[in-house]
Image (cartoon, coloured by chain):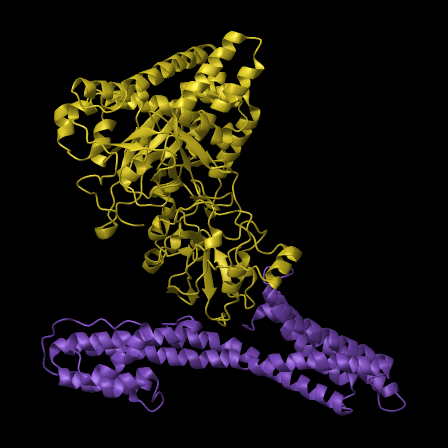
Chain colours: A purple, B yellow
């Protein structure tokens, strides 16, 4: 989520709440005979407030399950999730008087810290990366479609090369792979007139383009880097007849799109990968928080 | 839509008779035609015999012919001529007996029309009931029964429309979906206007709640398929043994130039279409049957070719036009040039503003059919049919019925709204803005890519909001600056998707949203016409089809309706957690932005 001026009321509210809580805690700590405790009246209030903040933050995932329920926009819920989730940490620290306590409360505090830190990291990533993706991936696809789009690129490249150079033993493996994926053979021209440089193009396709598009040597391939890719195709063109230059340009274009897909995948992972830590730990925290509350009240 | 090539000859089936030109001229609709004209198209017309239960055409099938149900009188004339030539195998005595009975019934119906026009307008069952009620007047009861029996004898086929069951909750029938639906009523159907009648390619309109009607002798159907090659708009099943003339477009065009044919068809329209069509119009909902019948006698059916001007801006306002078939483009000249104000479709009316305000026409109205396109998309334009209600008749209606006056005034107020009417703002923006057609977007969906985390909650919300569980939003499309313009209905100022629907199932809803009704036959015309790929074809599961129907409507068009039945913002926007999805009026939103 973009952290812009629309967050100002939440930011002010959070800062003011932390300040007030800090003052209350300081007064409480100063007046306490021993160290302030979580089971004192003030400590309990902090604990309840922290639990309420965490529950509200957790409710975002429940809210997403009922997308059509008109109980506030998801934007509003997301802002609440961010700021109240963050606020839960200082309140929990005040609740426990900056001590982790026994094993259960230690686990709770560690979980909360990891969750808040991962949340801050996630918020920062989601603030910055959408713009990066917009700039770096102009030919963006739906993430779920990326695998299919890669196959489409492979098929497009194959058909381009075969249309220009004709099929051969070099392209047989790729043809078989494409046929196995699509369930039908790729389109091939009936008649080919051999032109100058066709063997060179075929070799470049088989040795460089296909492995890159298949993802075998993503990092190692010169085509993985845009500058090296430009150099590769600039080097290739003079060795081809003029009629094959547009084919080389199209291949360069295909490789560029494949590079954008790789970049998109990577950025997508950064955008959403942290949730693999944040969400399960949040679930565990909520469960353990209830266990802690019940145990504290019972004993 | 399956593209059908015009065959040289009509395909043959058992019981067909190929008639000579001389024999065709014995049939009343061919009166006045020349033998030479008919002989120019050998094989383009055939007499077919149908038995009860046989299906003449099916809803959604490709069609390129029109059908005329032969009248008993025509059959008699034909058989007598054939008998004179020693050809007929059919008993002339039976046909004569039936013709005499029908003649007596026709005379009774004529007398009834003169003496009790509102009773004459009743359907067969109502006439029978009325006859029982007026037993104290034996003469009237006899007339009613004779007319009803003649009508029943002339009834030859039923025309029906398959509408997928409206009550069945489609998409998501699991425990969770059912519970959520029960608790919150989340999934919903699109907001539906109160459309009572469905126009089809025949001489009747079908009631939306029970889309079945009877076809009688002497009626023509399938003209739109024949002229425009639209898919068949309904299924026609024979109920009584009859003969039908099936003809290709060239024959139908010959007939349309024939005065006698046109008069006959006008009479049928007047009797059947106008009654139901006028009644189906929201403005005439309050009018009683008797007045409506009188009105139907006075209005005129007007036919215009695409591109033909119906009335010019500044011309005297002398009538109201109700659109029966086709579209009307409303344009207005102003200081900045000519601009399109609106497109009006079947069932809507034009010319009411000038009448009510007693002013000259404020806009020009032009008859319009779908774009002819190029290459494979090239189509032949069809005609536009209008019902003309003269000024005096119009004021007769609005003065007698204050509710109707209020409704018309409400429509005028709506049409003159600042964002839709002539005062709507104009904005000149970059050429890319024009190239992407963004100026069309009244509720253009935009996704701010600098905010969007690609979480797809918008797509999920869209799918969740529709009862079929299928999304109307694809998060793919062109970029305009840092905005993505996804494939979703943008509520165009110029909604070309509405042009050419053969069954009138696509129209504008009360909030200006595009609505596709349940009786869509899946012909894909709207999807192909939409320049922004915002209309998707969704395959129908077996359970979505109407019970007992064998018709093969395998898919239906689906379009974003801007969640108009939910209060407030569209679900896609409401469900975006990152404030990235917005719906805007593109002209004001992008005003001044050069991208």
| Residue at left offset 51%, top offset 12% | B141
In this image, B59 relative to B139: left or right? left
Quadrant containing the N terminus of chain A is bottom right
Residue extending furthest toward the right: A33
Numbered circles on residues, count: 0
Of B525 and B458, the residue lying toward us: B525
Q: Quadrant of residue B179?
A: bottom right
**Quarter placement of the C terminus of chain A:** bottom right
Note whether residue A18 is visible: yes
Question: x%, y% of residue B70?
Answer: 30, 26
Above or below, A58 relative to B475: below
Give the percent coordinates (x, y) of residue A266.
44, 82
Residue at 74% x, 82% y is A92
In this rendered view, identify the residue nearer to me: B205 or B54: B54
Please provide percent x and percent y for residue B536.
40, 56
Residue B376 drawn above or below residue A89:
above
Residue B380, position as x, y percentages in the image? 24, 42
Q: Nearer the viewer, residue B400 or B6?
A: B6
**Image quadrant where residue B534 sits:** bottom left
Q: Quadrant of residue B222?
A: top left
Q: Nearer the viewer, residue B225 or B279?
A: B225
Q: Is residue B416 visible?
A: no
Residue at 56%, 63% (x, y): give it: B575
């Amino acid at each position: 989520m973009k952290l812009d001026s629309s967050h100002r009321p939440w930011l002010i509210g959070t800062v003011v709440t932390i300040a007030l809580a800090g003052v209350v805690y300081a007064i409480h700590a100063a007046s306490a005979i021993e160290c302030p405790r979580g089971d004192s009246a003030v400590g309990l209030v902090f604990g309840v407030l922290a639990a309420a903040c965490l529950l509200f933050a957790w409710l975002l995932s429940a809210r997403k399950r009922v997308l059509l329920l008109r109980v506030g926009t998801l934007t509003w819920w997301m802002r609440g999730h961010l700021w109240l989730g963050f606020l839960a940490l200082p309140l929990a620290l005040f609740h426990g008087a900056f001590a982790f306590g026994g094993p259960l409360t230690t686990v709770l505090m560690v979980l909360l810290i990891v969750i808040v830190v991962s949340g801050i990291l996630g918020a920062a990533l989601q603030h910055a990366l959408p713009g990066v993706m917009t700039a770096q991936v102009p030919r963006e696809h739906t993430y779920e479609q990326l695998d299919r789009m890669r196959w489409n690129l492979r098929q497009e490249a194959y058909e381009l090369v075969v249309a220009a150079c004709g099929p051969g033993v070099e392209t047989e493996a790729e043809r078989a792979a494409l046929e196995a994926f699509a369930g039908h053979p790729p389109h091939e021209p009936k008649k080919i007139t051999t032109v100058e440089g066709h063997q060179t193009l075929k070799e470049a396709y088989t040795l460089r383009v296909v492995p890159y598009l298949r993802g075998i040597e993503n990092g190692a391939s010169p085509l993985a880097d845009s500058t090296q890719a430009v150099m590769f195709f600039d080097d290739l063109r003079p060795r081809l007849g003029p009629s094959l230059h547009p084919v080389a340009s199209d291949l360069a274009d295909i490789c560029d799109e494949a590079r954008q897909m790789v970049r998109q995948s990577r950025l997508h992972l950064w955008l959403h990968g942290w949730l693999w830590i944040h969400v399960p730990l949040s679930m565990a925290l909520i469960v353990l928080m209830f266990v802690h509350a019940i145990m504290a009240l019972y004993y | 839509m399956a593209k059908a090539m015009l065959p040289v000859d009509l395909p043959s089936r058992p019981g067909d008779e190929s008639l000579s030109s001389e024999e065709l001229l014995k049939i009343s609709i061919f009166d006045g035609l020349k033998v030479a004209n008919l002989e120019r198209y050998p094989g383009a017309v055939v007499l077919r015999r149908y038995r009860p239960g046989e299906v003449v055409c099916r809803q959604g099938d490709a069609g390129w012919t029109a059908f005329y149900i032969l009248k008993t009188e025509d059959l008699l004339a034909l058989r007598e001529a054939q008998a004179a030539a020693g050809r007929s195998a059919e008993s002339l005595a039976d046909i004569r007996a039936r013709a005499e009975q029908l003649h007596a019934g026709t005379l009774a119906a004529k007398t009834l029309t003169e003496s009790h026009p509102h009773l004459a307008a009743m359907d067969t069952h109502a006439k029978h009931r009325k006859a029982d009620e007026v037993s104290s007047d034996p003469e009237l009861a006899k007339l009613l029964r004779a007319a009803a029996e003649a009508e029943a004898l002339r009834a030859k086929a039923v025309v029906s429309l398959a509408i997928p069951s409206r009550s069945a909750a489609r998409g998501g029938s699991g425990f969770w979906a059912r519970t959520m639906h029960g608790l919150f009523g989340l999934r919903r159907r699109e907001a539906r206007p109160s459309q009572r009648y469905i126009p089809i390619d025949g001489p009747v309109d079908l009631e939306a709640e029970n889309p079945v009607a009877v076809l009688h002798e002497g009626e023509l159907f399938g003209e739109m398929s024949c002229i425009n090659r639209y898919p068949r708009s309904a299924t026609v099943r024979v109920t009584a043994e009859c003969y039908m003339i099936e003809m290709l477009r060239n024959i139908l065009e010959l007939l349309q130039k024939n005065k006698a044919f046109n008069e006959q068809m006008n009479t049928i329209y007047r009797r059947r279409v106008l009654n139901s069509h006028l009644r189906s119009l929201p403005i005439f909902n309050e009018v009683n049957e008797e007045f409506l019948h009188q009105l139907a006698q006075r209005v005129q059916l007007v036919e215009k070719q695409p591109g033909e001007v119906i009335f010019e801006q500044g011309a005297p306002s002398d009538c109201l036009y109700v659109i029966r078939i086709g579209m009307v483009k409303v344009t207005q000249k102003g200081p900045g040039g000519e601009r399109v104000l609106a497109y009006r479709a079947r069932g809507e009316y034009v010319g009411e503003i000038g009448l009510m305000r007693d002013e000259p026409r404020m806009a020009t109205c032009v008859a319009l059919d779908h774009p002819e396109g190029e290459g494979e998309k090239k189509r032949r334009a069809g005609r536009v049919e209008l019902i003309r209600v003269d000024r005096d008749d119009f004021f007769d209606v609005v003065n007698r019925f204050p509710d109707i006056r209020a409704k018309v005034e409400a429509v005028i107020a709506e049409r003159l709204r600042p964002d839709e009417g002539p005062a709507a703002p104009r904005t000149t923006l970059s050429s890319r803005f024009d190239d992407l057609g963004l100026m069309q977007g009244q509720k253009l969906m935009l996704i701010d890519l600098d905010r969007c985390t690609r979480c797809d909650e918008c797509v999920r919300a869209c799918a969740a909001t529709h009862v079929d569980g299928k999304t109307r939003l694809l998060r793919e499309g062109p970029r305009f600056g840092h905005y993505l313009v996804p494939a979703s209905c943008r509520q165009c100022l110029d909604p070309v998707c509405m042009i050419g629907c053969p069954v009138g199932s696509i129209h504008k809803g009360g909030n200006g949203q595009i609505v596709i009704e349940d009786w869509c036959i899946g012909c894909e015309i709207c999807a192909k016409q939409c320049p922004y790929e915002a209309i998707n074809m969704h395959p129908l599961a077996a359970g979505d089809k109407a019970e007992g129907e064998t018709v093969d409507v395998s898919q239906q068009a689906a379009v974003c309706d801007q969640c108009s039945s939910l209060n407030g913002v569209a679900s896609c926007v409401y469900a975006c957690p990152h404030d990235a999805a917005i719906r805007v009026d593109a002209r004001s939103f992008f005003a001044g932005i050069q991208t």
